Amino acid sequence: MWENKDIKKILVSEEQIKVRAKELGEQITEDYRGRPEQLLLVALLRGSVPFLAELIKHIDLDIQVDFMDVSSYQGTKSTDIRIIKDLDTSIQGMNILLVEDIIDTGKTIKEVCRTLMNKGANEVRIVALLNKPEGRQVDVEADYNGFEIENEFVVGYGLDFNQRYRCLPYVGVLKEECYTVKE
């Protein structure tokens, strides 16, 4: 396993992610099989891409995939939500499964869900690799959860700090000295 000196500890290994993505994919397949509407997976760039890539291997349905780029963090601080890249697909009457790397404050995912419903989606459900309930500031829960984690600053498997650490093949806790400002 690729080690990184900035990681305090590994929370979720690559193997654990693969096993859980398979379980989630099988559950999603079961829940959506036989429904007349095609399922559209909407992945939030950039953090959810590794999770999406693993998850779709295990969904045995004819699905579509599209992407949104939504910004809500600068460093470790949650900021206003901005849509940088919108969907290329019309979602009128579609079932949407929003693919997210982590639900922390819940602000981003709640706003994206509201936006998708306003665009005419039939329904919006959420699948998240990580759930951090201690960080929640708004009432939102994923329909499919990978792993529940403590209120720690995590990186890897798509999650970043200022665009770094995304390529780690696991989810780890970043050492505090890597993201705190010395005064």
Image (cartoon, rainbow, N blue to C red):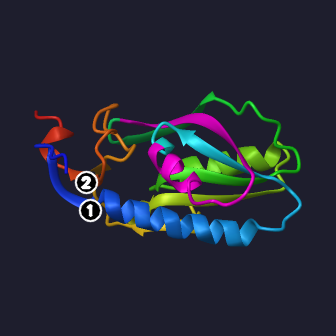
Q: In the shown orientation, is residue 124 left or right of residue 128? A: right
> Residue type at mark 1?
Leu
| Residue underneath mark 1 | 11
Cα gap from disc 2 to disc 1, whole angstroms: 5 Å
- Residue at the top extreme, as displayed: 84
- In the picture, measured across the screen, residue 88 lies left or right of residue 162, that is right
Q: Is residue 21 above or below residue 102?
A: below
Q: Which residue is mark 2?
A: 172
Q: Amino acid at mark 2?
A: Gly
Q: Are marks 2 and 1 in contact (CB under 8 Å)?
A: yes
Q: Earlier in the sequence, mark 2 or mark 1?
A: 1
Label drawn at residue 140: none
| Quadrant location, the C terminus | top left
Q: Position of residue 39 (x, y in %)?
A: 76, 54
Say above or below: 44 vs 124.
above
Q: Judge from the rendering whether residue 77 lies leftward or rightward of residue 2; answer left or right.
A: right
Most foreground residue, 56 or 41? 56
Q: Which residues are magenta?
A: 50-74
- Residue at left offset 45%, top offset 42%: 47
